[in-house]
Every structure is written in structure tokens, then in C-alpha cells.
Amino acid sequence: MTTLHRPAHKVLFVGAHPDDIEIGAGGTVARLIDSGWDVWFCILTTEDDPKKAQKRKIEAVQSAQVLGVDPSQIIFLDFPDKNLQCNGHSIEKFRMALKERAFDPDIVFTHGYESENHNDHRAAHAITRGTFRKKILLIYPVVNSLVASSFLPKLFIDISSGYKRKLMALEKHESQSQHGRIRIEELTKLAKRCSSGLDIAEAFEILIQEGSDDQIGLLYGLNDCPFHKFWHSLIDTRILNIIHGLSVQREKRLWYWPGDKDREGVTLLSRAFQSMWYGPTPIDDYAPGTAFLESSLLKNDILLSGGAVSNLITRTYFNHFKGMRYIIGYSMPDYTDIHIRDLSSSKKIYAQYEDLPRHNRTVTKDVGILTVMKNPLDETKQLIGCMGIHGFGTLACHKVLSSRILLKELMELIDVPLIYKGYQILIDYNVRNEKVTFRKKNLHKM
């Protein structure tokens, strides 16, 4: 698990009620405390009954202390429970409380709006949003009132080290446990459902407000999602230029498989970025043969999709770079004997096929070469290769680059950011069950 080395940063967790923060983000609080962050709580409402109000405040302080939050860093604003309102008064009171304590957070965690059906939680979101107009807001779910279909998280924090403390903190809210509000089984299910390739995680929506762009870098330090860890370490906020292959046209149609697998893979990766990346998708897509590819794109972050048979740039450049162990080879004329060539042993690796009626054949198992390396023409940039013997092998590489679970497995094999010049690994793809498998013994360090 990655440690969050951000000791200078300040963070505020806002909850409508005393137990909301622990329910939605208790594991994250513990994780940040352990990493040296300056963590504050602000609880917006209080009970009408003075005895109940006092009991809940005591529970809130005890719970926060379990997580590591100092009682002096808990703000109680005492707005009325069940009738929280976002207006000028509530926002001004919030701002004054922060000003009196000279506390200006870098990032604020709070309730959702569209993903919430509790009126106090929705009001808490509006108040927080009005108070912090140039801050990044991270939205946590409260499972008791969550509108699951509207909760679309993009930031995932591994809480395996702090989950027990989260549960211990929730035990301090005895008054709520008695009323069935603390639902540990549902919390655990949500944490596992939001794991995003991690063992257990808390998930957050991201709201980037105007004027908060300089804080986006903090999100990458927080995010344990394998998709973000992999891609941010390689391209940061730069554009990834994808150069894809073209289907090879033969005089006789001797093969059968549906669709353009190269294009399917590029689409899969693009959709993964659309659903998980912060801001616009960082992909520019180019077809081979575009005039300026050689002079421009080979000096950028690029992804070559398709082997030497279908991709002009792969055939012209990639197969001739120093350090390659695996390339796609073939025989001419008519692009026959397509295979992966192991340049270290001259061994040829083939796909597996099945004969069909009417003299057609189809691929049952394909093999792809996934390459992650520094661009030989500009080593400050990256070159990624998705190259199959056939389109299925190319698709398998794209599946790895699009999947949080497969990227986690890949990053257990390679280092990102790149320590070496790069890596190549072979990937098996079973066409029938769409299963992707790494050939770990075939990992090549350049």
C-alpha cells in the first residue's frame, strides 16, 4: 500500500451529523492522520434535546480521538438537526468559525447532493460548496441515505490499514447503534464494492471548482486506484496520442472473426478514461499514414495499437528500436506466417486456431505484446505498445490498460514510474471466455 507523504497539507471533513464522517470516510481519516496530515472535523447540526445533544457531542469527540483527531480540531456549528438550511447565515457562520481558528484547508470532504436522499446531507453539501468556492470537494457516501445509481466515484483510497479503527470509532456512537443507524454489514459491502482493484477502499466523487486547478496534484497523491497510479505516473496531465492499425485486406477471405479488435480496444481504453479520469479524456486518436506522425507524434506520449502487419509506425519504427525482445513478424506476400518473434532466442510464438466450415479458420487463443517504455526519440515521454499476433492479442493489451484489477497485477510485475528503459510482457487471450493471462516468465526488462 502506498503511503501518503503529504505532511504539510490540511484537510477538513464536513458532516451534517456527528457520525456521518466516520460512516463515509472514517478509514480515510485514519489513513491521513497516520500520514501526517492536519485533519479537522466540522459537524454542522445538533439535537434539539440538550441531553441528547451533549451525549452525541461526547460520542463525536471520542470517535474522532479513536481515529487520531485532536478534540481541539473539531468544530461544532450547532445548526438545528433535521432542518439544516443553506443560506447566507449558515455560510457566514461557517466562514467565521474557520477564520477564528485561522484554518484554511487544502481539500474538503463533504456530503453529496445528487447521490443523497437526506435533506440535511444535501444542505450540508450546499453549505460546504458555498463556503469553499475555490476548493476541490471530495464527496463521500453515507450508506444509510445513498442514492447508489447517482454515486460516481473517481477517487479511491485504500483503507486496509485503518478499517479496524473506523469500526472502533463507530462503536463510540452508542446512541446511534441502538437505533440501527450504524450498519456495519452494509458499510463493509460498500467498502468492498468500491474497492476498485484494492482490498478494501473508500470511494469519493470529485468536484473541481473554478480556481482550484492548482490543487489537482493532491488528488493523484491521494488516489490509490491502480488505473490512476499507472496512467498518472506515465503521462501525468499530458495528452496520450494513440496511433492505431488498419485492417489488412487479403484477396481471399480465409479468416473469420467479428469486428475490428484494434478499434474495439482503443474504444475500451477511451471509455475507461472517460469514466475515471479527472477532466477531459487525455486521448488523441490518429490513423496510420497521417503525414506528421513521424515528425511529431514520435516525440510525444504515444500508444501504438496493432502489430507490424496493421500498423505502419510499428512496422517502420518499433520493430527496429534497440532493446526490443518481442516483435510481431510475418512473411510476404499476403502477410502470412504471422507470429511473435523472440529476438533473444529466434523462437516463434503462434496463436491457436480452429477450422470452420466453408474453408474458414478462426482464432481461439491469441498472444499480445504489451510494451511500456520510454520513448526512444524523447525519453521524457512514454511509448506504449499494444500488439497482438492478431487483433485479439491487441485487444488483450487494451483490456489490461483499461482494467483496474489487471493494472494492479501488472504493477506488481513492473515499476511505474519507469526505473528501467522499459518492459515487455506477453499476454495470452482466450477468445472463447475472453480471459486475459500474463506470461510472467516472459517479462523482459530493457
Image: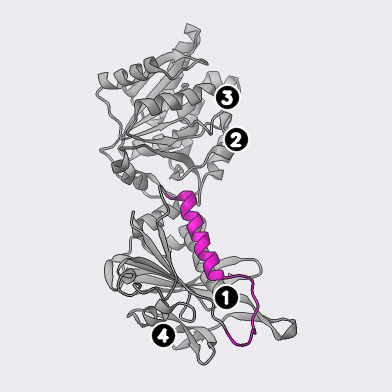
Whether label 2 touches label 4, CB < 8 Å: no
In x, y percent, where is residue 71? 34, 22
Chain part drawn in magenta: 250-277
Single out the residue that lies furthest toward the bottom. Answer: 333
Q: What residue type is labelled 1?
A: Asp
Residue 412: tell me if it is visible: no
Residue on which the image places disc 4:
343
In x, y percent, where is residue 121? 50, 25
* Relative depth, front residue between 154 and 313: 313
Single out the mark in the foreground, 3 or 1. Answer: 1
Q: Say which quadrant the C terminus sits in.
A: bottom left
Could you classify mark 3 by the number of other residues whose Cα lies within 10 Å: few (under 14), some (14-19), or many (20 or more)? some
The residue under the point 42% across, 81% down is 315
Residue on which the image places disc 1:
366
**Dot placed on the residue nearer the N-terminal end, 1 or 4:** 4
Q: Distance between the residues labelled 1 and 4?
A: 19 Å
Residue on which the image places disc 3:
181
The residue under the point 59% across, 39% down is 149
The residue under the point 58% across, 85% down is 250
Single out the mark in the foreground, 1 or 4. Answer: 1
The disc label shown at residue 185, or none: 2
**Dot placed on the residue nearer the N-terminal end, 2 or 1:** 2
* In the image, residue 302 above or below residue 75: below
Q: What residue type is labelled 3?
A: Arg
